[in-house]
Amino acid sequence: SEKDEFYNFGGKTPQETISFFVTALEKNNLVLAVKYFVPEVREKESEGLTKLKDANILGDLITDLKTLKNGQTVDKAHYLFKVFDETGQAAAEVELFKNKSGFWKLLAL
């Protein structure tokens, strides 16, 4: 992939990256928030976050992300969190990738 100008945005752990991402969302700073994604999905995720913000449901995403638990290591460079709905069923996954600089980046929400 092309050189990522935001390669050093992210946490040293998956949990830290989620925390930084949530803080950016809480400040309604979508420009900062998308820097926590891998470059390949940034544009698509930016559009998705903008739609959530415009529909006034960004707060729902923030709430879900703040309650993430039960993360699991997939391999050395991949980590996965499950997002559960009100009934306790897995509703979505949050996948993270560790880049060559050692920072965890969001792959998918």
Image (spheres, rainbow, N blue to C red):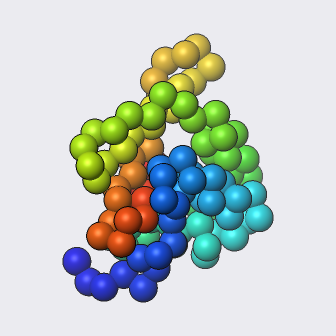
Q: Where is residue 53 in the image (x, y as percent from the top left)?
A: 68, 59
Residue 79, position as x, y percentages in the image: 36, 44
Where is the N terminus found, in terms of image quarters? bottom left
Asked if 91 appears above or below 36 in the picture, the reply is above
- Measuring 42% from the left and 65% from the top, which residue is drawn there? 103
Farthest top residue? 87
Q: Is residue 10 left or right of residue 72?
A: right
Q: In this view, does 58 lie to the left or right of 94?
A: right
Residue occupying the far right of the picture: 27
Q: Which of 96 and 75 is in front in this view?
A: 75
**Figure quadrant of residue 63:** top right
Residue 21, quarter of picture: bottom right
Q: Can residue 45 be seen in this view?
A: no
Residue drawn at x 52%, y 61% is 11
Q: Please say if 16 is above or below 82.
A: below
Left or right? Give the position of 62 relative to 99. Answer: right
Q: Where is residue 70 in the image (x, y as percent from the top left)?
A: 48, 28
Tell me, yes or no, if residue 49 can be seen here: yes
Vertical relation: 46 (above or below) 23: below
Instruction: Please give the count of numbered marks on the rendered protein.
Output: 0
Residue at image location 28% in from the left, 39% down from the top: 74
Image: 67 above or below 33: above
Of the pair 100 and 34, the residue shown nearer to us: 100
Task: Point out residue 65 in the picture as x, y percentages from the top left corner.
Answer: 61, 42
Q: Residue 39 falls in which quadrant of the image?
A: bottom left
- What residue do we see at 57% from left, 53% from top? 16
